[in-house]
Amino acid sequence: MDIEKWTSKGIELATDYGLRVIGAIAIYLIGSWFFKKLIIAAKKIMVKREVEESLQKFLLNLLNWSLKILLIIAILAKLGVETTSFAAILAAAGLAVGMALQGSLGNFAGGVLIMLFKPFKIGDLIEAQGETGVVKEIEIFTTKLIGLSNKEIILPNGSLSNGTIINYSTQGTRRVDLVFGVSYDTDIKHAKEVLTQVLTLNPKVLKDPAPSVNVLELADSSVNFAVRPWVKSEDYWEVYFGITENVKQALDAAGIEIPYPHQVEIQK
């Protein structure tokens, strides 16, 4: 009787666990196939919507590992393993990791926002966080710029996405803001003609929008003119320095004085 009882019990256990193992294998095979199709579909959607490649890789890896964890939990549950405590451990571990990586998660979120809303792209000249440079790389946690003096600048995406970003490349053109002062003895009309001619002779200055020369203010020792030429973004500094030099030469040639502090020696 005992042998029959244990044999019957063994057959029952083998049948029960055998069915569970078969079910677990089925869940693994079907789940793996389905999740693979899901990841492929997600990748196609991101490619279609032109999501940044680095963001694609990160999100696909995140999705892949999340689905693997779900698959493992489902297989363990089918085998009869208590998954409630297992899920609680995962949640606690996730919370601990989240607290430890709070800054990194903020940078990750900032990187996602930058890649989704695209306030700038690689090659744009931007000013942000007190730095100015050309965007070299947009990564998931940081953005790299090449500064105007050819230095590499690395900005965390968290603070970058939350701060003010000035993009000088979006419109394709920029206005160069210059101020030049002449003495009060100068004929204003003549000075404007000289300054306007400097802008007209510069081939980098755009005709449309038209450059402007106007009296800006009557300062303590000079009449200041606001000189505003428009240029292509890539010509900004060349025009800035070139116009400054040309104005000095043109004013000297026209006999127009540029005021500067004078020291008068008192004879004793």
Image (cartoon, helix red, strand yellow):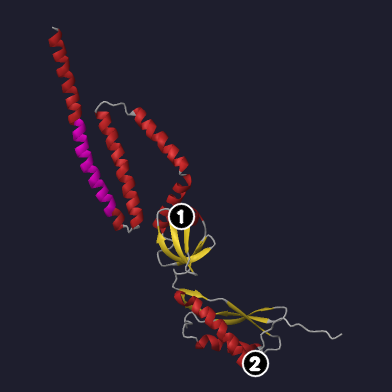
The dot on residue 157 is 1
The dot on residue 169 is none
Measured along the vertical axis of the image, is residue 190 above or below residue 233? below
Q: Classify residue 82 as left or right of residue 193.
A: left
In the image shown, does 265 or 251 lie closer to the viewer? 265
Amino acid type of disc 2? Gly
Q: Residue at x 16, y 22 (%)?
A: 15
Q: For the residue carrying disc 1, how many other residues have a C-alpha within 10 Å: few (<14), some (14-19), or many (20+)?
A: many
Q: Position of residue 187 (x, y in %)?
A: 67, 90
In the image shown, does 146 or 72 lie closer to the viewer? 146
Q: Quadrant of residue 113?
A: bottom left
Q: Is residue 38 magenta?
A: yes
Asked which secondary structure carries label 2, the reply is loop
Residue with the most extreme front position: 268
Q: Residue at x 28, y 50 (%)?
A: 42
Amino acid type of disc 1? Asn
What residue is disc 2 on?
255
Q: Residue at x 20, y 27 (%)?
A: 20
Measured along the vertical axis of the image, is residue 216 above or below residue 57? below
Q: Classify residue 265 as left or right of residue 89.
A: right
* Magenta region, residue range: 23-44
Q: Is residue 229 visible?
A: no
Q: Position of residue 93 (x, y in %)?
A: 41, 36
